[in-house]
Image: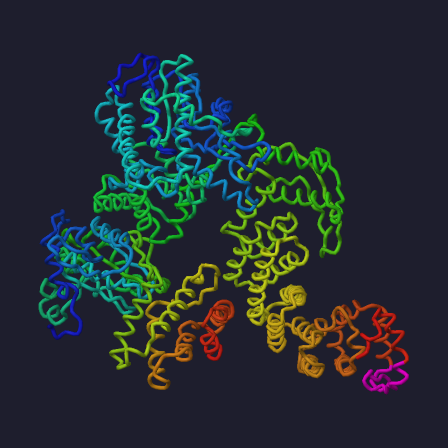
């Protein structure tokens, strides 16, 4: 067992990848470790001919994963879009691991990312001592990916300043990276491609330019499709996180989790689960991740200040905090929701009262 | 093309007439193309098409230049037009192509399905509300789907294509049939070989299905048997008439039953068809639309993607590039970015996806997925545009003017006769007394026609204000072009009532409908007396209200709903749903009122002021305790908010006082604040207007309020007085002259001393008791009731 806190996908699932490669007879695009079909199988899980069980990495639509893999096979760059907590980074990492066997060629997008981080930088001591040379140059992850024919990843693309984003345009259309200082260039070899992820809630941060957008195929990763699926995710994640917080597993009852997930799903979609009533949607994301934190918050309150078992009062404050991000608009939305939906629902009277007290 | 055709020996043919059975897929462009080719090759002298013989006489009209598919044949009972069946045809329907071929070549064409005169009128009468639905399910059964459970029967070729790994049946047909034919150099007997193959395939499929699945229910099986018997009899009849080469176009499923019919005993078939009940039927062509062909509109035997099929029909061969260009053009027309480079990339992605899925050619699935990822940048809203405009399509068909009268027209004529309202071209004014049945029916008919876009009568505005008058003044003028509009409206239904209901539901389901448009529609529905449409509209209204953030719109929607409850003839159940929605609206209004009334200008405040009054009336009419309390709470919050215009706070105070939610002391306190010197005189004036307008009696009866107003006005500086004078004058000017005189007198003595309020008058109980018997008589009360 490795002592690192978190292993890279390609080492964690090394056995699966090698089993897939062994069984994979379909044609592989140049420099791909697996055929597109096998990559899809790796992501969605399945059983191989030799009996190896492949764990599903992504639970959701097969269609989406097929579009993503096909995009990379057409040497178009792939943009994974979605609200926070929809496994964009997770999918990108596993795609890179399956296709190139290397998920580490990563640029983490922040407001402080400079062009050097995307392309190449210099070892200044050497640069001063020897002048510009190959040895003085420090290649960035994307440049490495080009040279080795691997998948490069750009996380949170929209957080990168626009002018730095646009330095990707040449790389994506010409597949070359000029190095004027050395009067040379790096030409991408087959197998090179880029997977970028972006959050479509704060697209406005640094909206992609039209020119860059056109070089990507976009796949929007949705929130969990069904209620049961989301309950399962919330339950599992909150249990794992609760363990880290030393909260007893029994603190968060499945009934309360179901209620929280229902509230989140209804407010997110703007439609009640019975499909009968439309409701207004608050300004926040209402992501699965927030639902998990409401559960944990409630569990912590119940364990440290309450009876030990989570009650409506314990989740109400977390719920109110997660929903009301804008004190005026969101409050109206939540009040309407309480009055028109929660109040009428059988057995939800306690939640209704607790939320009203917290407003 | 005219030559005698040597053919490979197939089924043993009848000695006198050669029968070629062309088993097709309904509305399949691939089948249509094969039929076209086969007919040119066969040169038949008679064509039999699976369709209703009731409409044989209408076939020649298909040749008219004014006949543009999609159109539908409508078979109905003249005495009960709602009992009807539609047979739609698109340009790419094989049946349509066969008809067109026959008409051009001047060959007799016959429909050969079991006539509707034996099929209609066999169902028990349904209540009107369910009939529209029933119609549609009937169409489904009519085509060739006896049981909904066996999809193989509905579309056997699709089932086979799916089994072969195709997502798109038409592409399968194209690749398996058309392209292979072309590759083989188009040997002359190939056009029929396709259909022979299909017949053979269907024979196996039928044997398999019949052995495999449990029998569909007996009635359906019998009906199927009869239909095929009738088809065989039609073929035999054609043979008797001396035709030599007969082409039979039928759904693939029936093909085996019509091949080699000499093996079936004529006796058996006639026995099957003996003693069928018969009704009188009539037929008409009506314009149809692509979206009515689509499954999405609930038309059971339809196809998912008429627009796509039309594109396949227009340009055979590799569709991917053309399709993507269409998509790109559509997006550009809607001012969305779609460069040519992206079109190329989208085609490449579609092809890669196809290869990954190990399919031989991209189908609609792959094309749409690629369009979504590349052209639409992952945005489903843009894909929906493509779905609506290209995949389904919005094409509207056209029928020639000389087509037989549609049943809707018949129904309309009947009603016009019954109500003695002949359509006249010259203008006429009609005064309708709602208390008389005939007049009421007239008004309903006019309203319904208006809903159907046939504005025969125009209601004079204001003639029925507030529902207090029962007279309606209508201007009647029949214009000749209404005849066309009647035919267009036939799409919605066969009687005025049914069509109006369907149209109202259609309007309600329109995606662009807003709270106010829906509320208006509700008013319209009430006038047109269509309670059947109420539940749908209420459902939509509830949804629209849920997402509407415009409190004003919500408030405007309330009066029509209240009227529907008060005056409408809606049935009890519908009335409940109206009430439900109304309550939902009120709850939202109550929650949003305070925020909506803050920081708005004078004009907006005036608008809100009138809206508050109408909503208040609605609340009082409903008189539900919880709602009233909620409304009062909302008014209280609003009245106590600083940044709200005085007009609104004033009115809120008045409403609360009048309805006893606030005591006189509460109100006085608010009044004192509002009229205090610290407040701007304009605001105080507005408050006074809001509070007092309508009735000033309050001031005469409540001394302390009078005192407050009095001291406010006398305390104003000259400038301030001039500023508020118009407001005050407007307010007081509305009061009846008697009230004004009394106030004037009171103001003249300028002080409360001379006026004692009622509470301070000493009453002598004995003397007062003497008046009571007289009062009882005036009020019409029985003596014992009045006590206490």
Specify whether A129 is left or right of A59. Answer: left
| Residue A88 rendering spot, x and y as whole percentages | 27, 62
| Residue A308 rendering spot, x and y as whole percentages | 34, 83
Colour mapping = rainbow
Which quadrant of the view contains residue B259? top left
- Give the quadrant of the C terminus of chain B: bottom right
Q: In this view, does A149 lie above or below B276?
A: below
Which quadrant of the view contains residue B180? top left
Q: Is residue A301 above or below residue B285?
A: below
The residue that appears at 60% across and 33% down in the rendered structure is B79
Q: Name the residue nearer the viewer: A64 or B292.
A: B292
- Give the quadrant of the N terminus of chain B: top left
The residue that appears at 81% across and 84% down in the rendered structure is B759
Specify whether B227 is left or right of A1. Answer: right
Specify whether A178 is left or right of A202. Answer: left
Q: How many marks?
A: 0
**Magenta span includes B767:** yes
| Residue A98 rendering spot, x and y as whole percentages | 16, 58
Specify whether A239 is left or right of B44. Answer: left
Q: Name the residue nearer the viewer: B396 or B750.
A: B396
The residue that appears at 13% across and 49% down in the rendered structure is A30
Give, as a single range, the part of the protein colored magenta.
B749-769
| Residue A20 rendering spot, x and y as whole percentages | 13, 55
**Magenta span includes B773:** no
């Amino acid at each position: 067992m490795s002592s690192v806190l978190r292993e890279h996908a390609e080492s964690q699932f090394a056995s699966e990848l090698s089993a897939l490669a062994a069984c994979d007879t379909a044609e592989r695009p140049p420099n791909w470790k697996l055929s597109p079909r096998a990559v899809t199988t790796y992501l969605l899980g399945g059983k191989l001919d030799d009996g190896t069980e492949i764990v599903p990495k992504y639970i959701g639509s097969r269609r989406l994963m097929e579009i993503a893999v096909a995009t990379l096979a057409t040497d178009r760059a792939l943009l994974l879009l979605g609200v926070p907590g929809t496994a964009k980074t997770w999918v990108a990492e596993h795609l890179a691991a399956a296709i190139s066997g290397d998920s580490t060629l990563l640029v983490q997008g922040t407001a402080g990312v400079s062009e050097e981080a995307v392309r190449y930088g210099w070892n200044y001591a050497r640069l001063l001592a020897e002048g510009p040379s190959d040895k003085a140059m420090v290649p960035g992850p994307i440049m490495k990916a080009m040279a080795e024919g691997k998948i490069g990843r750009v996380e949170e693309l929209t957080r990168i300043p626009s002018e730095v984003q646009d330095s990707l345009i040449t790389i994506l259309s010409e597949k070359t990276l000029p190095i004027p200082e050395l009067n040379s260039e790096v030409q991408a070899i087959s197998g090179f491609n880029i997977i970028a992820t972006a959050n479509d809630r704060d697209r406005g941060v640094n909206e992609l330019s039209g020119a860059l957008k056109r070089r990507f195929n976009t796949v929007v990763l949705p929130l969990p499709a069904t209620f049961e699926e989301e309950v399962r995710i919330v339950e599992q994640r909150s249990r794992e996180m609760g363990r880290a917080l030393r909260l007893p597993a029994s603190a968060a009852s499945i009934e309360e989790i179901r209620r929280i997930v229902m509230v989140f799903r209804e407010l997110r979609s703007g439609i009640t689960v019975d499909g009968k009533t439309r409701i207004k949607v608050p300004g926040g994301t209402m992501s699965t991740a927030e639902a998990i934190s409401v559960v944990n918050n409630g569990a912590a309150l119940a364990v440290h200040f309450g009876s030990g078992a989570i009650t409506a009062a314990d989740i109400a404050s977390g719920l109110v905090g997660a929903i009301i991000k804008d004190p005026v608009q969101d409050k109206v939305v939540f009040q309407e929701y309480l009055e028109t939906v929660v109040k009428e629902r059988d057995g939800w009277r306690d939640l209704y009262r607790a939320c009203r007290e917290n407003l | 093309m005219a030559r005698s055709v040597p053919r490979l020996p197939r089924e043993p043919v009848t000695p006198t007439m050669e029968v070629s059975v062309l088993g097709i897929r309904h509305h399949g462009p691939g089948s249509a193309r094969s039929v076209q080719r086969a007919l040119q090759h066969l040169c038949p002298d008679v064509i039999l098409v699976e369709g209703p013989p009731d409409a044989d006489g209408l076939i020649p009209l298909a040749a008219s230049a004014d006949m543009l598919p999609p159109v539908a044949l409508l078979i109905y009972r003249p005495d009960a037009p709602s009992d009807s069946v539609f047979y739609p045809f698109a340009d790419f329907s094989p049946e349509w192509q066969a008809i067109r071929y026959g008409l051009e070549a001047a060959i007799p064409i016959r429909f050969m399905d079991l006539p509707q005169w034996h099929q209609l009128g066999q169902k028990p009468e349904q209540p009107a509300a369910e009939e529209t639905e029933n119609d549609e399910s009937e169409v489904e059964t009519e085509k060739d789907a006896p049981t909904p459970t066996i999809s193989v029967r509905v579309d056997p070729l699709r089932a086979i294509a799916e089994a072969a790994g195709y997502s798109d049946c038409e592409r399968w047909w194209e690749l398996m049939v058309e392209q292979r034919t072309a590759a083989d150099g188009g040997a002359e007997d190939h056009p029929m070989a396709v259909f022979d193959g299909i017949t053979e395939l269907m024979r196996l499929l039928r044997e398999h299905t019949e052995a495999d699945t449990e029998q569909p229910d007996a009635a359906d099986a019998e009906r199927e048997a009869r239909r095929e018997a009738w088809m065989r009899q039609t073929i035999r009849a054609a043979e008797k008439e001396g035709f030599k080469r007969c082409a039979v176009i039928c759904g693939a499923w029936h093909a085996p039953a019509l091949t080699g019919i000499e093996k079936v005993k004529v006796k058996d078939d006639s026995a099957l068809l003996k003693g069928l009940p018969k009704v009188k039927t009539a037929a008409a062509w009506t314009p149809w639309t692509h979206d009515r062909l689509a499954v999405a509109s609930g038309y059971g035997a339809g196809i998912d993607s008429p627009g796509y099929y039309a594109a396949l029909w227009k340009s055979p061969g590799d569709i991917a590039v053309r399709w993507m260009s269409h998509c790109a053009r559509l997006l550009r027309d809607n001012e969305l970015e779609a460069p040519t480079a992206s079109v190329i990339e989208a085609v490449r992605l579609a092809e890669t996806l196809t290869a990954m899925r190990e399919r031989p050619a991209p189908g609609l699935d792959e094309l749409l997925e690629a369009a979504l990822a590349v052209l639409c940048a992952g945005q489903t809203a843009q894909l929906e545009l493509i779905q609506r405009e290209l995949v389904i399509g919005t094409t509207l068909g056209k029928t020639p003017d000389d087509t037989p009268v549609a049943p809707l027209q018949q129904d309309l004529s009947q009603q016009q006769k019954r109500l003695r309202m002949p359509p006249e071209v010259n203008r006429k004014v009609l005064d309708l007394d709602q208390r008389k049945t005939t007049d009421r029916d007239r008004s309903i008919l006019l309203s319904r026609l208006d809903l159907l876009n046939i504005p025969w009568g125009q209601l004079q505005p204001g003639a029925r204000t507030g529902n207090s008058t029962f007279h309606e003044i209508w201007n009647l003028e029949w214009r000749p072009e209404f005849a066309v509009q009647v035919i267009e409206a036939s799409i919605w239904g066969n009687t005025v009532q049914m069509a109006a209901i369907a149209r109202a539901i259609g309007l309600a389901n329109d995606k662009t409908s807003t709270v106010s448009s829906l509320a208006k529609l509700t008013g319209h529905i009430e006038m047109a007396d269509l309670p059947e449409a109420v539940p749908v509209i209420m459902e939509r209204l509830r949804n629209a209200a849920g997402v509407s953030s415009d409190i004003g719109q919500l408030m405007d929607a309330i009066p029509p709903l209240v009227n529907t409850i008060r005056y409408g003839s809606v049935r009890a159940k519908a009335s409940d749903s109206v009430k439900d929605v109304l309550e939902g609206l009120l709850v939202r209004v109550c929650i949003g009122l305070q925020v909506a009334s803050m920081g708005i200008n004078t004009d907006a405040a005036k608008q809100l002021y009138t809206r508050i009054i109408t909503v208040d009336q609605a609340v009082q009419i409903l008189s539900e305790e919880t709602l009233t309390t909620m409304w009062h709470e909302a008014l209280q919050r609003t009245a106590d908010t600083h940044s709200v215009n005085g007009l609104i706070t004033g009115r809120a105070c008045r409403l609360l006082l009048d309805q006893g939610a606030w005591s006189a002391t509460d109100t006085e306190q608010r009044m004192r604040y509002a009229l205090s010197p610290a407040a701007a005189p304009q605001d105080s004036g507005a408050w006074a207007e809001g509070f007092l307008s309508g009735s000033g009696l309050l001031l005469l009866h409540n001394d302390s309020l009078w005192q407050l107003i009095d001291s406010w006005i006398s305390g104003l500086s000259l400038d301030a007085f001039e500023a508020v004078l118009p407001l005050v004058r407007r307010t007081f000017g509305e009061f009846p002259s008697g009230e004004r005189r009394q106030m004037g007198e009171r103001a003249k003595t300028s002080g409360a001393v001379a006026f004692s309020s009622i509470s301070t008058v000493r009453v002598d109980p004995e003397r007062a008791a003497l008046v009571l018997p007289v009062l009882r008589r005036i009020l019409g009360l029985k003596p014992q009731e009045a006590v206490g």
